[in-house]
């Protein structure tokens, strides 16, 4: 039978990928989205061992509006599970456990489908809100915290209070990232080691699109009105097949630094054309994780279709 493909958002303060402790096979990671789903899927009592596979890793603090995973579930009589039942039962189980994870849909897919390797690409969204009347001097410790930030947007959007912000300059510079480049400068060092990660071509990636569009507040009531009066919201969408560790956050961080006049276009050009882990400009800050969302994992519909359906 084919695996089951589902879409589910990541949750606050959780990474999506589960931690595996080889010295303790019985360890269950309930602080990750994948680990929680592994446990929740036990409610179906499949005869096979549950091994979920996720399409994309997201760091702790990064959100997911739409993410995907696949899993094989085998009944003792060999009959397939009803897709809608899987969605409903899992959502009810997760709700009862107080876990803010929700499946959007489930479908049977062919055995050839793999939620990670079959993906055509991924779209990430980074949300920023720029104060319309920025603070000229942010050197004092509390200036940023004296400004109004709606409670609904805490850890959901990156708020900027700099007096200088040039979004057109940001748009123009974003075009430098589009295409195939060695993004070694824009990769943070992670703890995972493998021969493939040491290969010189591992950091060569292609970005298909970067779009910077007006966004909107996610607030309600009085807070929504006040937020729209005080801030201009911007959505930065980055689309590509795959990304390096913290690559999107480093790209956004460099674009924000340019828009706020901390660096110039030459700095970004040199980081792209002279790729090196030592070439990251010390004036730059990586954009905070909480402003980033995995917005969509893209597939070819033909890869999802089962022949007998």
Image: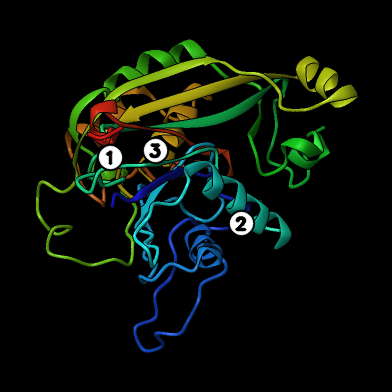
Res. 242 mark: 1
In-image side of 112 versus 45 (left or right):
left
- The percent coordinates of residue 217 (x first, y second) are 71, 23
Q: Report crowding for label 2: few under 14, some 14 to 19, many 20 or more residues within 10 A (C-alpha).
A: some
- The percent coordinates of residue 85 (x first, y second) are 55, 47
Residue topped by disc 2: 13
Which residue sits at x=54%, y=38%? 104
Residue 300, above or below 109: above
Helix, strand or loop at label 3? It is: helix
Count of numbered tags: 3
- The percent coordinates of residue 33 (x first, y second) are 52, 58
Which residue sits at x=90%, y=23%? 222
Residue 162, above or below 171: below
Q: Report crowding for label 3: few under 14, some 14 to 19, many 20 or more residues within 10 A (C-alpha).
A: many
Question: Nearer the N terminus, badge 3 or badge 2?
Answer: 2
The reply to whether callout 3 and callout 2 are in contact (CB within 8 Å) is no
């Amino acid at each position: 039978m084919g695996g089951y493909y589902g879409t589910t958002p990541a949750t606050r303060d959780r990474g999506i990928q589960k931690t595996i402790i080889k010295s303790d096979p019985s360890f269950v990671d309930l602080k990750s989205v994948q680990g929680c789903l592994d446990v929740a899927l036990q409610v179906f009592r499949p005869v096979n061992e549950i091994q979920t596979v996720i399409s994309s890793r997201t760091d702790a603090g990064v959100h997911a509006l739409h993410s995907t995973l696949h899993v094989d579930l085998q009944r003792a009589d060999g009959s397939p599970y009803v897709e809608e039942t899987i969605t409903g039962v899992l959502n009810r189980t997760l709700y009862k456990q107080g876990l803010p994870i929700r499946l959007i849909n489930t479908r049977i897919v062919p055995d050839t489908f793999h939620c990670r390797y079959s993906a055509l690409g991924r779209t990430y969204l980074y949300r920023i809100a720029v104060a319309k009347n920025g603070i000229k001097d942010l050197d004092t410790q509390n200036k940023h915290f004296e400004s109004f930030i709606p409670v609904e947007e805490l850890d959901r959007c990156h708020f900027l209070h700099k007096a200088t912000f040039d979004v057109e300059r940001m748009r123009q510079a974003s075009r430098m990232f589009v295409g195939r480049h060695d993004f070694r400068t824009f990769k943070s060092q992670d703890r995972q080691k493998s021969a493939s990660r040491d290969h010189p071509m591992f950091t060569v990636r292609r970005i298909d699109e970067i779009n910077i569009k007006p966004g909107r507040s996610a607030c309600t009531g009085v807070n929504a009105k006040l937020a729209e009066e005080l801030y201009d919201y911007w959505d930065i969408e980055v689309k590509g097949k795959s990304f390096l560790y913290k690559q999107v956050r480093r790209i956004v961080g460099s674009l924000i630094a340019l828009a706020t006049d901390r660096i110039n276009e030459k700095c970004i050009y040199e980081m792209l054309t002279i790729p090196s882990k030592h070439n990251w400009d010390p004036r730059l800050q990586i954009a905070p994780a909480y402003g980033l969302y995995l917005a969509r994992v893209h597939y070819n519909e033909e890869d999802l279709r089962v022949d007998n359906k």
